[in-house]
């Protein structure tokens, strides 16, 4: 059962880490230290996570509100 939890965790968070790694490679040159790459990758991963969390909250609030508009014809 524990292995399923790790597989689920990897399925959710691995794309976020990969996006952070990709963005850090775009921002830094190969000559930079690997510690800098790691720190920037973690920072970008966290920012991607926050952006997804923001979108989730936005979608939930729109769903709760019903996304109704008052049209006056």
Image: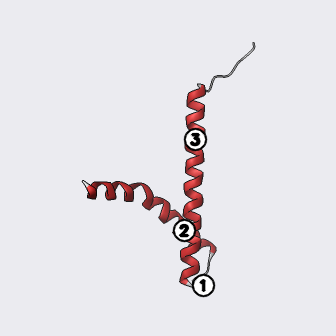
**Do the numbered discs 3 and 1 sit on residues whose CB atoms are within 8 Å?**
no
Within 10 Å of the Cα at label 1, are there few (<14), some (14-19), or many (20+) other Cα atoms?
few
The mark lying in front, picked from 3 and 1, is 3
Residue 43, located in which quarter of the rendered image?
bottom right
Q: Residue furthest right?
A: 73
Q: Position of residue 56 (x, y in %)?
A: 55, 43
Residue located beneath label 3 in the image: 57
User: Which of disc 2 and disc 1 is earlier in sequence?
Assistant: 1
Residue at x 52% of width, y 63% of height: 19
Residue located beneath label 1 in the image: 32
In the rendered image of this protein, does residue 60 appear above or below residue 27?
Answer: above
Residue 57, located in which quarter of the rendered image?
top right
Q: CA distance from mark 3 to mark 2?
A: 22 Å
Disc 2 on helix, strand or loop?
helix
User: Which of disc 2 and disc 3 is earlier in sequence?
Assistant: 2
Within 10 Å of the Cα at label 3, are there few (<14), some (14-19), or many (20+) other Cα atoms?
few
Residue located beneath label 2 in the image: 42
Q: CA distance from mark 3 to mark 1?
A: 36 Å
Residue at x 55% of width, y 50% of height: 52
């Amino acid at each position: 059962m524990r292995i399923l939890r790790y597989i689920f965790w990897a399925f959710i968070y691995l794309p976020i880490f990969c996006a952070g790694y990709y963005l850090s490679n775009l921002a830094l040159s190969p000559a930079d230290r690997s510690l800098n790459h790691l720190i920037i990758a973690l920072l970008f991963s966290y920012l991607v996570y926050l952006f997804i969390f923001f979108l989730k909250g936005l979608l939930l609030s729109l769903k709760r509100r019903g996304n109704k508009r008052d049209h006056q014809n």
